[in-house]
Structures are given as C-alpha cells and as structure tokens.
Amino acid sequence: MEFRLIDRIRERTAQGREDVRLGIGDDAALLAVPPGMELAAAVDTLVEGVHFPVGTAPADIGWKALAVNLSDLAAMGATPAWALLALTLPDTLAPAAREAFVDGFADGFAALAGSQRLALVGGDTTRGPLAVSVTVHGFVPAGQALLRAGARVGDAVLVTGTLGDAAAGLALWQRAESDARAASLVARLNRPTPRLAAGLALRGHANACIDVSDGLLADLGHICAASGVGAEIEAALLPRSSALLGLFDDAAARDLALSGGDDYELCFTVPAARATEVQADLARLGCGATRIGRIVAGEGVRVRDADGGWLEPSRRGWDHFAA
Amino acid sequence: MEFRLIDRIRERTAQGREDVRLGIGDDAALLAVPPGMELAAAVDTLVEGVHFPVGTAPADIGWKALAVNLSDLAAMGATPAWALLALTLPDTLAPAAREAFVDGFADGFAALAGSQRLALVGGDTTRGPLAVSVTVHGFVPAGQALLRAGARVGDAVLVTGTLGDAAAGLALWQRAESDARAASLVARLNRPTPRLAAGLALRGHANACIDVSDGLLADLGHICAASGVGAEIEAALLPRSSALLGLFDDAAARDLALSGGDDYELCFTVPAARATEVQADLARLGCGATRIGRIVAGEGVRVRDADGGWLEPSRRGWDHFAA
C-alpha cells in the first residue's frame, strides 16, 4: 500500500543524488554520507488542528511539514539532503478525495524539496487522523554545526526576517480576513521559508543559533539555558512587518513578535564587534537580520519596553502540550 | 515541551555511542557514519486501532514501534545505530495518565533499544490521536545490503521462525482468550522480535530478503515483483507454532501463516545448493529457518496444497489502507 501513495510524492520529488544508493521501494533506503561530514537529523510532526488549522490546503501542509524540519537544519548550519515521510490520512476520505489530497500534498512538498535538491528516500502511509511526521537529514562539516550552547556574555542577539507574522496570520485566518495584507501574513503561517542560506552563512560566525518555532522568548530561552547565560531584548527593536503593524496595534504586534510561534526565522548570537559584518553578509543573501538585544550574565530572557521598564509578557511562547 | 517527555525516554535509552556527536536537546542530532558504511534508513508509523488494538499496554506499544522498524534493518542486513521518535498522545489524558503512559512506553522502547545498543537521538512529542512514528538508522558495509531484487530462478525460498502467530494472537486478543498458548501468540503480536542477527548472517548468502510485515504472500510477492520472477510455495512446509496448531484448525492455521501480518520474520531466497548450509548458520544463532518453496520463471506467488493442487487464498495479505 505504502507505494501507491508514496510513489506519487516521489515522482514529484525525484532528485538525482549520487549519495542515494537505493531510494524508496525496499525495506530501507541506503545512503552515503560524504567524507568529513556529520549527519544532522531531526524529526517534527504536524497534527491537524494542532499545528495547522482544519481546512489548510493540502499543498500548504506538504510544504510546511518539510519546511519546519528544514528550519531545524538551517538552525544547525546544515545543507539538506534527504527526508523520510510518515503520512497518516483519514480512512473516511473517499478515494478521489484522498488522491486529491495526496496530489496537493505532493505538490507542496516537492516545490520546497526541489528548491533544496532534497530527495525523499523513505515513506510510510497509514490510515488514521490526519498527521504528518517528517525526518530530515543534512550534512555539516564535522565540528562546524551551529549549536544552542555557545552564547557568551556580551554577544549581540540577532534575528532574521520579521517576527509575529505567522501567529498574526493564524488569528486572521480564524477571522477569515482576506485582504492583501492579511493574505501575506497567512502565507507566512502556511508557507514558512526555512532560512537555510542564512544558516550556512552563520557557520564560523554565530556562537549560538536556534530557529524560532515556539516564539522568540521560548526559543531564545533555550539558547540561554543551553549556554548558561541570560538575554536582554529591546521591544522597540523587534523586527515587525508592515502588514503586521498595519493590522494590529503596537502592543498586540509586540506580543505576537515576542511570543508568536511558527515564524521559522533564525535567532542567533555573535560577538558584538562582528554583528554589523554578519548583518552585511546576510543582507547579500537577501536575508535581513536585526540586532534586538544582548547576552548578559544570569539566566532567562528579559524584555525592555520603549520607556526603559521591564515588560512582563503574558505568554512565554507556544507550548503545544503544556502540562 | 518536547524535552520533558522525550527526556524520560532518553534516560532509559542512553547509549554511549561515539558516533553520536550530539544527541537530543538541540535543533538536530549530529551523527557520524563509520567509513565504508552505508546508512540504512526506514520509517514506520503505528496508529492506535490500526496497527495495535485499543488497550494495548504502553510498554508493548513502545517495544513494537521500535521492533517493526528494526525489522526493516534486519531485512537489509544492517546493524542498528540510531532512532528518532515522533510520539502523538491524546490531550484528553490527565497528567498522571500521560506520565504513566510515557513511563510504560519508555520501558518497552528502552528494553529493545538497550539490547541492540541503539541510541535515541531525536524526538518530537505532540498532542493528538495516539500514534507513534519511528525513523531508524543502521549501518551496512557499502554494497552488501540485502535487497528485494536479486531472487533468481531456482533459488530456494526460506523463512525464519514461524508464521501466522501474530495474526492469531490478534484474533485471540479480540476474543479475550487467556490461556498459556493464547498468551504466547498474543506476545508474538505485541512483542515481535526483529531478526537482526539472522539478517547479518544472511549477508553474502541471500539473493533477496524482506521482512514479513504484511503477510507471507504479500511480502514474497514484493520479492517476486522486484526480482522479475515468480515463486511456488508448499503449504505443507509452512512453519507453524504448536500454539497456533493447537488453537486453530489446519486450514485456518494455514491461511494465517500465508496471509497474517505482523510476524516480522525474514523471508529470503538463496541458491538451492546452499540452502542447507544457510539453515545451519542460522540455527547456530538460535534462529530456525524453514525451506518453504522455490523461485520460478514467471510472476506472482502460487501455493500448492498437500494434495498437489493450487490453493486460491482468500486474502493476499494485509493492506492497512486498501483503496
């Protein structure tokens, strides 16, 4: 059974990669890691109604399921290579609806995979509530991966792109807002762009790096915990899109930028003296990066408001499974 | 969030493996494949009510989720190394019930992982309908993996262990049968043993190999399709356990052995002249193997009954997602 559905995805994602010695169709794929490279591996699951709203287009689900995993590779400074896909589809779908879902899903998955020369090397499809689990593999020269641990007191804290857009997009989608600005934010929710080129460019420069999947406060908090340091962020410096600022008041936009998940930007730290040079490097790749704060002694993330006081954010980030 | 649940599993599965450069806790694991080795990678998902009955013990779910994946490595002749786990748990579970589930799941997963020196290197937990997706990785010397393609006309067809037990166990579990023979069959369903040592021993000997997850007819059919050959099986030669034969009549036991899934034995072909030697090799590992038929020109799998006629099996194997 696996093969009928997975084959349709494979047709759209075929990549001529010499490191794939045996692709889909046997009990396992056979893969070759280039000499001198470490293998970076990560898994993420998307469940309907938890990680994407009911009614999300199949192509967007396919794109996003891969994107959130590629974002983990980006945060390590790794180059994507292979993915394995576990897709669970409801058996209440009629055959035609299932085919339409698979076609759409494959289109979205393949659009992103193709742009990264990523090969789908394994798959399993089963029936059950709609969920997608992707395991992704990439290469990074041995010893050069970007880690969460490594931030040092005095480092500048930077973030790529803009924050809060995806969480805003979710709110707008739920309200069925449909103007152009809302559409741009909903697109950030449904079609996140993993910052792979930025991750590669940060190798040898960033002391610590993470992707912003659960919200800036939560994810920068992970860097602080792993590095044994604290961080201070200036709310006034948070990069926010014009669409976000056009549709939400300043306080709401700030809270979304601090705590909204699903943006898949990179948050990283570099020695303060090199922050400008790193920003220029990323700008040449078409990826803006904004300096938003600094690493300090202590622990945890604090946020200074425009008037110089400390904010007490109402939410510390998304937790899909809060105890 | 991921870390609270995954950490409890990791505590029980910690393996001191030098090839794990960075384990759970960052955006991705960093792994080193030994020189000269290819990486074998496979993914399988278990969904409650589809791949295991509602009410299955958490420890059995943990064991089986890993076992079915290790069975894919066994069928390739690969040595297990690492796994990534995606676990989806219902948010209707109270915290204490969730903890009890995770503890049990971790115990079962770790019991099997520990016996194979397998390290859990990545995980994602989320809320939703109960499902487990495991991606497993193993090593095989370059060019030596066992494939489905490669069976040749004249090869003997063999299978390890006994067939039909797990499907019988499912039937008995559903009837709540509880005597010792029934318990042994239910254990085959809940705690399958991946034939890893047998898979290693078959490298350099077997022309084709697959694990019996969907039923002998279906899986031997995959070997035939991949190899461009047919197969003839003698029903009288099918290896069946005394528990199976004690609780089912001969025809029912035969059909279970032909079409029942979830046994995770290996089905393989070897040149006929070497079948006895290979059987002896496997016997020294404590793994019986039975010669059940031969590879012929043509296509598909035919089954000869004890009277010399051809059987028309009522089912060609399990298909969890039949169109």
Image: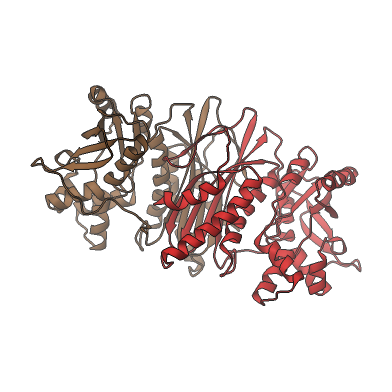
Chain colours: A red, B brown
Q: How many marks?
A: 0
The image shows residue B5 at horizontal and vertical percentages of 54, 56
Residue in the picture at 74% in, 74% down: A179
Compare residues A98 and B141 and report the one nearer the observer.
Answer: A98
Residue in the picture at 57% in, 70% down: A55
> Residue reaching furthest front?
B298
Compare residues B321 and B257 and report the one nearer the observer.
Answer: B321
> Residue reaching furthest bottom?
A175
Compare residues A239 and B107 and report the one nearer the observer.
Answer: A239
Q: Quadrant of residue B55?
A: bottom left
The image shows residue A120 at horizontal and vertical percentages of 54, 45
Q: Is residue B26 left or right of residue B226?
A: right
> Residue reaching furthest left?
B307
Q: Using the image, determine if residue B169 lies above or below residue B274.
A: below
Q: Is residue B52 left or right of residue B255?
A: right
Q: Using the image, determine if residue A82 lies above or below residue A263.
A: above
Q: Quadrant of the C terminus of chain A?
A: bottom right
Q: Is residue B27 visible?
A: no
The image shows residue B269 at horizontal and vertical percentages of 29, 31
Q: Is residue B223 left or right of residue A194?
A: left
Q: Is residue B180 left or right of residue A194?
A: left
Compare residues A119 and A303 and report the one nearer the observer.
Answer: A119
The image shows residue A176 at horizontal and vertical percentages of 66, 76
Q: Using the image, determine if residue B201 lies above or below residue B189.
A: above
Q: Is residue A281 visible?
A: yes
